[in-house]
């Protein structure tokens, strides 16, 4: 009886492993990288990835974690095939993209000023914006007249 149970476990593990292998191959193809490039980007050794893809070895938890973190792959999708292949971007990453380093530096400098100095800078910025709008309107008037 233990032999039958062992064979059943091997067969079911093989099916699960094959699905993970298929999805891992799909993730690599989707990334536009070859196996070596994918290995370098995820930190999972090249030979190990080849073994995963060939179904000769089941992916270790650490390797799955590296793959999913480095490639933004949804771990649930990789393991089960359910959900989207890629995770939704994190709010922190979105905020970082929206605020450039230069803007962040300016904000840091601005916040270091006292309230009076901040008002002065805001006043100058508002005046500069007003002048820019006036110059734009003047340019449009010249085009119409000219």
Image (cartoon, grey):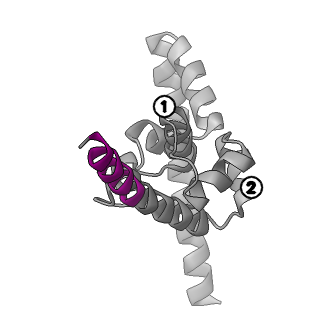
Label 1 residue SS: helix
Verify whether residue 45 appears in magenta.
no
x, y (%) of residue 66? 56, 38
42 left or right, relative to 59:
right
60 left or right, relative to 35:
left
x, y (%) of residue 45? 71, 42
User: Residue at left 52%, top 70%?
Assistant: 137
Quadrant of the rendering where the C terminus is positioned: bottom right
x, y (%) of residue 68? 49, 45
User: Residue at left 48%, top 65%?
Assistant: 22
Q: Quadrant of residue 80?
A: bottom left
- From this viewpoint, which residue is outermost toward the left? 1
- Any mark on residue 122, and which? 1
In the displayed structure, 87 sits above or below 99; it is below
x, y (%) of residue 75? 39, 46
Check disc 2: other Cα within 10 Å, few if <14, some if 14-19, many if 20+: some
How far is the residue under mark 2 from the one under mark 1?
49 Å
């Amino acid at each position: 009886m233990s032999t039958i149970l062992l064979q059943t476990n091997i067969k079911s593990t093989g099916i699960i492993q094959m699905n993970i292998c298929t999805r891992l191959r799909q993730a690599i193809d989707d990334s536009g990288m070859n196996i070596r490039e994918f290995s370098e980007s995820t930190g999972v050794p090249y030979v190990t990835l080849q073994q995963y893809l060939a179904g000769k070895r089941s992916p270790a938890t650490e390797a799955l974690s590296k793959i999913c973190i480095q490639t933004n792959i949804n771990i649930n999708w990789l393991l089960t095939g359910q959900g989207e292949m890629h995770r939704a971007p994190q709010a922190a990453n979105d905020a970082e993209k929206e605020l450039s380093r230069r803007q962040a530096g300016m904000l840091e400098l601005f916040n270091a000023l006292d309230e009076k100095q901040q008002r002065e800078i805001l006043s100058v910025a508002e005046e500069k914006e007003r002048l820019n709008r006036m110059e734009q309107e003047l340019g449009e008037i010249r085009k119409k007249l000219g």
